[in-house]
Amino acid sequence: GSNPYRINRFIVGDPATPSSEADIISFNLPGQMGAAEIDADAATIKVTVPTGTNVSAVTPEFSLSAGASASPGFGDVINLTVPVQYEVTAQDGTAKTWSVEVTFKDSDEKEITSFTLSSSQIGNSVIHRGNGLIKVNMPHGSDLSAVMPSQITISPSATIAPAVNTARDFSTDVQYEVTAQDGTKKTWIIQVTLVDPALAAVDFSTPVGFAAIDGDGFTG
């Protein structure tokens, strides 16, 4: 009988013809600020990192045109204190020389990225970056009058006041001011709630993971 199935074959271009594309599609450095500026016509890449970043021995992550190769290659350690040239070779042998340059800029990051009040804390802190609010649960009966936080992590190159090793009275809302490298400031508020773990709706004996609260909260 007749075959009810028909296969349509679509061929774009000639698969036997090697590609002449020799582009760097993406380029990333650790701690990079924003996306790299890639100009395929000029074969240049500009990457911005925070002031003071050590770029003398870095391992960039990058992607190339399909089938292309590069030198330096993937995983190679390079010195970007001066512009570095990448030689990208296409499938058909076409070579293209790219120049990668790093510029430095003071960072405007001023986040508290993680916060732990004490080892007896119940669950993870919930961090709302949008409004600079951190919520912490502690067991009923905890003395909050003079507590030095166990751990506070802030944005790289930022500073925090008062200092992390300062004991604070967490029985009321406590404020921290984080100053970015570029001098801009952000006020953070720590709110501690005393709860009874036995009556809590959530099992706080294990980390609850990341959670969206008011659209911008996460645990940390």
Image: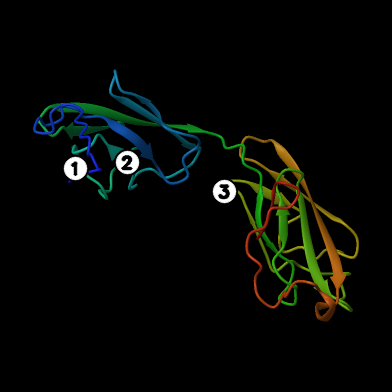
For label 1, the SS is: loop
Toward which corner of the image does residue 143 lie, by quadrant?
bottom right
Label at residue 62: 2
Residue at 62 percent across and 41 percent down: it is 109
Residue 194 in view, yes or no = yes
Label at residue 135: none
- Disc 3 to disc 1, how far (Cα)? 69 Å
Q: Position of residue 131 (x, y in %)?
A: 77, 44
Q: Amino acid at mark 3?
A: Pro
For label 3, the SS is: loop
Mark 3 highlights which residue? 156
For label 2, the SS is: strand
Marks 2 and 3: in contact by CB < 8 Å?
Answer: no
- Disc 3 to disc 2, how far (Cα)? 23 Å
Residue at 75 percent across and 73 percent down: it is 122
Mark 1 highlights which residue? 2
First in sequence: mark 3 or mark 2? Answer: 2
Residue 81 in view, yes or no = no
Q: In the figure, 26 relative to 150: above or below?
A: above
